[in-house]
Each structure stands twice: as structure tokens, then as C-alpha cells.
Image (cartoon, grey):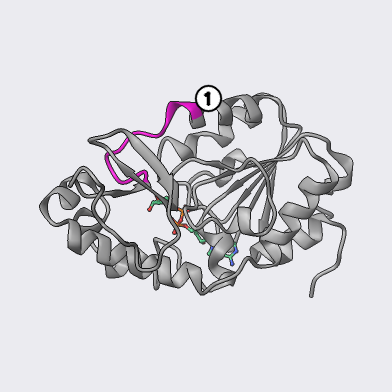
Amino acid sequence: MTPPLFKDFERIVFFTGAGLSVESGIPTYRGKGGVWAEYDYEQYACQRAFDANPTKVWDFHDKRREKVASSAPNDGHRIIAAVQAEKPSTAVITQNIDGLHARSGAKDVVELHGSLWRVRCDACGIVRPDETVPMTPRKHDCGAYLRPDIVWFEDSLDPRNLRRAHELLESADLLVSIGTSGVVYPAADLPRIAVRAGAVSVEINLEDTPVSHLFQHRLRGTASDMLARMQGKSVH
Ligand code: APR
């Protein structure tokens, strides 16, 4: 069956997860070879762990910075940026912290879970870009440790990002969810907003997820292949 084609829609929303960056060589979080299979997120990705041992948490995030810095956007990222260039009201809402959407040329990306490439000092209330690898200096001028501007477990999402995501999803005519396992909330609930608003909905993943039932079209294959199909290209 022919999947929905981008040419037939105007207000497209891409909702992306770690599966989109796999073809750039960046591991997912769950499943075989996932980050959380190797690292206990309670020791590396929550405020309690950071308060207890900021060096250990920074060493872990520096490894992730090194990996992403030596990676590049893949065809999946490029197709999304190309659709947006052609149809400027196209939006990108991502759970990814790798910054590869922006590096592929996508604009106004809503980074629900923050970014590897920003740091903040909660004592002083400052947030700033930082692309040093490894991240240096690890302490702010005030003497407090800087922390990655990432939404860790038990952290809340930035309400401005959630509000923006809601607005975009409510007015979408096509929702394309790509490479997310649909198990982390509140992000996993967001596609429902577009589905309820009557958007045509597509889930791209290698396998079924706990939220697959929400979607009218379930394209099973790699992100770049299935996105190419939605461009009307045939993939083998
Ligand atoms: N193409 C499409 N989908 C893929 C590909 C691929 N090449 N490779 C893997 N996938 C799918 C997997 O089948 C899985 O469903 O991508 C999904 C990745 O799931 P997760 O690792 O759980 O990543 P994600 O859903 O983005 O995680 C959500 O959890 O750990 C937190 O904050 C972190 O943002 C992250 C959130």
C-alpha cells in the first residue's frame, strides 16, 4: 500500500526519537546495544546522581558528546530538513538531544528533552550553548558545577516546549512519528493530540510499539527508507 506522500500535505509535524539517529551510528536507549543496557540511568542521568558524583555524570555525558561530535546527520534527517525547506510550516518535535536535526539544516526544532550542546548553572539561572569536547570548564564562575541542559529522569519538561508542541500538533494535517519506543511520558502522549485533531498519522519503526495502535499507517523499516517512500521514492 502506498504510504501518505508529503506532497499531499501542508502542516506536517515530525515527532522523532533515538531510532532516527541510529543510521548516524548513535545507539538508541532501549533494546539490544541501548545506552541504558550498559549504563544505569539512576547513576548517570538524574539530578540525585549528579549531586552525588558530578564527575562521573560528566564523564558519561562527555562520552556521548564525543560520539555525537564524530557523527553526522543521515538521510532521514536530510529528508526531514528538505521537506521543511519546501514547506516552511513543517515542524520538528524531537526527544533527541544530539542536535543532528539542526546540523542537517532543520529550523525551530522543539527539543523536548533538551540538548547535549547546552549547559546550565541552576544556582545562577543561566543556560548557554557549549560545544567543547570534553566539556570544560565543568564549573561555573560562581563555583557551582554546570550541568547538561538535558531533561533527566524525574526532571520536568520545559512548559514552553510542551505548549509549543501542543500548538503544532493541534494544527497538523500529517503526523509522522519516527524511531521512538513510545514508553517515556509525557512525550509518548503527544502524538495523541494530532490524532485527535484529525491529522493523518504515520508511525515509522522497525517494530511495533505500545502506541502503534494510535497510528493509521505503520511503516516497518528504517527511518531513511520509510521517509524516502513518503517522498514517493521506491526503496528496495
Ligand atoms: N529506524 C527506525 N526506527 C528504529 C531504527 C531505525 N533505523 N532503529 C531503532 N528504531 C526504533 C526501535 O525499534 C525503538 O522503538 O527506535 C526506537 C528507539 O527507542 P528508545 O531507545 O526507547 O528511544 P526513544 O523512544 O527516543 O527514548 C525516549 O527515553 O531515555 C529517554 O530521554 C531519553 O529521549 C529519550 C526517551
Whether residue 4 is visible:
no
In the image: residue 110, left or right of residue 229: left
Is there any visible trace of residue 186 in the rendered image?
A: yes
The residue that appears at 29% across and 70% down in the rendered structure is: 38
> Does residue 184 belong to the magenta stretch?
no
Q: Which residue is mark 1?
A: 163
Q: Is residue 155 left or right of residue 187?
A: left
Q: Residue lying farthest left?
A: 52
Vertically, is 162 above or below 58?
above
Percent across and percent down for residue 109 are: 60, 43
Q: Callout 1: helix, strand or loop?
A: helix
Residue 27 coordinates in the image, percent (x, y): 45, 69
Assign the C terminus to one quadrant of the image: bottom right
Amino acid tagged 1: Arg
Identify which residue is drawn at 54% across, 55% down: 99
* Residue 65 falls left or right of residue 198: left
Q: Which residues are magenta?
A: 150-160
- Against 176, residue 38 (above or below) is below
In the rendering, at what x and y percent does residue 60 appear?
28, 65
Nearer to me, 88 or 179 = 88
Give the farthest residue toward the front: 141
- On the image, the x and y values in percent for residue 172 come to 72, 31
Taking the magenta stretch, the answer to whether it contains residue 151 is: yes
Left or right, 57 with reference to 208: left
- Residue at the spot 18% in from the left edge and 62% down from the top edge: 55
The quarter holding residue 194 reads: top right
Pick whichever, 66 or 131, lies toward us. Answer: 131
Q: Main secondary structure of the magenta part?
A: loop
Eyeballing the image, is 97 above or below 165? Answer: below
Q: Residues within 10 Å of mark 1 (few under 14, many from 20)?
A: few
